[in-house]
Image: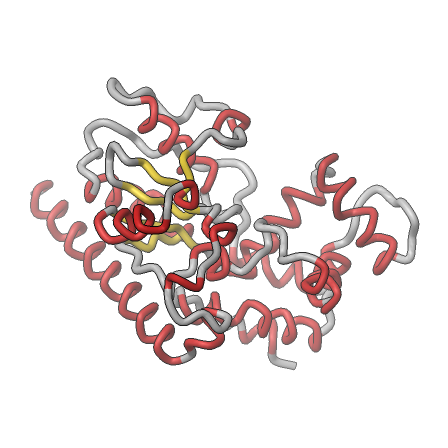
Amino acid sequence: MYLLLHLITAERMHNLQEVRKQLLKENCKYDKEATSEGKQSFEDISDSEMKHLIVDDKHGIIYCYIPKVACTNWKRVMFVLKQGEPYQDPSPISRDLAHVPGGFTLLNSFPRIEIKARLKHYTKFLFVRDPFVRLTSAYRDKFEKGSNIYFDNFTREILRLYGNQPNPPHISFYNFIQYLLDPQTERELPFEPHWRQMHRLCHPCLIQYDFIGHQETLQEDAEQLLNTLKLQNDIKFPPSYDNITAPESLSGWFRTVPLVERRKLYKLYETDFRLFGYRKPDELLDG
């Protein structure tokens, strides 16, 4: 009975992957300009735009990490793989160690001809999340908790522009949305990775990913991926506990955001919604 259930689950997860990849392919074909920002092929992606692609040559893996989508835990896994056998448990690896600058080999560190060879032969994966839930999680983590780095780099300026206060304790969620919608934000610098659109970090219309995981089915997807990589008996994906933002809580977060700005925000992240199969949040967008 156990074996039968395992086979049924494996088939269901495989079929789900095929649906996700086909949906991505169809949407990329539907609106090439919007999804690729004018880029026609992989050759149009600059080296700096590949800095979220981590390479593990030993296992033949490329992981595109997206902040606020289980990336700390996946970096823990990648860190353990890099250390080699016998593989240690990824869970105790500290967050600081998982995010240490220069701790991983990035795809853009190789010559172009070697980059193309790795993209052709390695298993490439990414994990995505409901775009509005991801934004809310980013706000909670970076502004509500009062990160010193983000206070110095972003909070003071956001408060000056939208908070009508020179230096209160923290910005509101609405102030954060105002900042994202301000055209000047994008003109000055590309969006910070914690709120940059997922397709702009990983280029899924120009790089053919072998596996697309979702935060909403994280543990199941992680198990399936480790099976695909033949690592299921060696590594257990760490459980996720902190800063879990549920889709059901969105209405509470967005109640302070006027309808017209909710609709503008959706347009800003619409490509992510479409590419990765997330439902349009009509309950937030209908007057």
Q: Residue 71: x and y, percent?
A: 46, 41
Q: How is the image coloured?
A: secondary structure
Q: Nearer the viewer, residue 23 or 106?
A: 106
> Total of numbered circles in the picture?
0
Percent x, y of residue 279? 45, 70
Q: Is residue 129 left or right of residue 12?
A: right
Residue 71 position (above or below residue 37): above
Q: Is the residue 141 above or below the residue 23 in the image?
A: above
Q: Is residue 236 shown left or right of residue 34?
A: left
Identify the residue at image location x=46%, y=29%.
103
In the image, 234: left or right of 276? left
Asked if residue 166 lies left or right of residue 181, the reply is right
Q: Nearer the viewer, residue 66 or 214?
A: 66
> Where residue 287 appears, x then y in whole percent?
65, 81
x and y percentages locating residue 278 in the rendered image: 43, 66
The residue that appears at 28% across and 47% down in the rendered structure is 118
Which quarter of the picture shows residue 268?
A: bottom right
Indicate the quadrant where residue 182 lies: bottom right
Q: Quadrant of the N terminus?
A: top left
Residue ID at (49%, 75%): 34
* Closer to the camera in the image, 3 or 232: 232
